[in-house]
Image (cartoon, rainbow, N blue to C red):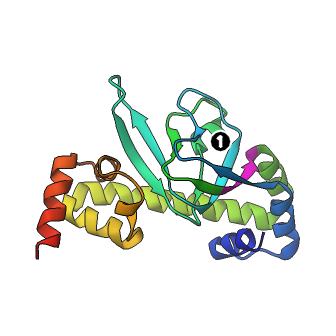
Amino acid sequence: MEYLKNAFLRIHPIPEESLEKLISIASIETYEKGYLLAEVNKFTKNFYLLKKGLVSSFYSDQSSKKYIRTIFTPGSTTGCLRSLIEKTPCNLTYDCLTECEVYKFDFQKFEDFAKDDIHLTNLYNKVLKNLYLQLESKIYDLAVLNATERYLDMKKEIPNIENLIPQYQIASYLNITPVQLSRIRKEIYSK
C-alpha cells in the first residue's frame, strides 16, 4: 500500500489518518487486457488508481468504431466520473489496453469519508482540478497542435507506447487515421 500512499501524496498532501481511511476502502486488483472497468450505458460505483498498465476511455459510434478520448497511465485516477457524480449510466467505456494492476475504490464510501474529512475533501477537489486541466489541455492540443506535434507529446508521456498497444489505438487517441500515423512515424524516424 506504500505505492497508494505515495500516489495520493503526489496529488495533494494529506495526513496519515486520512490516508488510512482511503486505504481501508481500497482493494488491489489485476485485470486482463480488454477488461472493461466501466461500460457505456451501465452504472458504475468504483473509481481506480492505476498502478501498472494503460487504460483508455472511449466513445463508439453506431458502426462500433472506437474514438479514444484519454489514455490513462500509472499514477492516474480513472473511472467514469460522470456516472459516479450524477449517478447516471456511463457515457464512455473504460478499457484495459494492457494487463492492469489497479487500486479499486467504492466512490460512495470515498464521498462519505470526504464529507467528514476536510483533507479528503481537499484531495477530491485537487483530483477534480487535475482532471479539468487535463481535459482543457487535450482540447487545446486537438485545436492547435498538428498530428505530428500531438504524436511527439504523447511519446514524451508514454515513450514505449508502440510496444504496448496497437497502432490503430494510438491513431485513434491522436484523432488521426492509422495511415496518417504511419506517415508521421516514417517522417520522424527517417530523419
- Taking the spot 40% from the left edge, 58% from the top edge, the residue there is 136
Rendered location of residue 28, percent (x, y): 74, 56
Most foreground residue, 42 or 133:
42
Most foreground residue, 58 or 135:
58
- Taking the spot 84% from the left edge, 67% from the top edge, the residue there is 18
The span picked out in magenta is 102-107
Q: Main secondary structure of the magenta part?
A: strand
- Taking the spot 74% from the left edge, 51% from the top edge, the residue there is 105
Count of numbered badges drawn on the protein? 1
Q: What residue is pinned by disc 1?
A: 85
Rendered location of residue 46, percent (x, y): 70, 44
Judged left or right of residue 44, residue 144 is left
Rendered location of residue 87, percent (x, y): 67, 33
> As shown in the figure, which amino acid type bears the numbered disc 1?
Ile
* Residue 146 makes an appearance in the image: no
Placement of the C terminus among the 4 image quadrants:
bottom left
Q: Residues within 10 Å of mark 1 (few under 14, many from 20)?
A: few
Q: Is 62 placed above or below 26 here?
A: above
The magenta stretch spans residue 191: no
Q: Could you tell me which secondary element the residue under label 1 belongs to?
A: helix
| Quarter assignment of residue 83 | top right
- Taking the spot 66% from the left edge, 56% from the top edge, the residue there is 102
The magenta stretch spans residue 106: yes
Judged left or right of residue 104, residue 154 is left
Rendered location of residue 190, percent (x, y): 11, 72
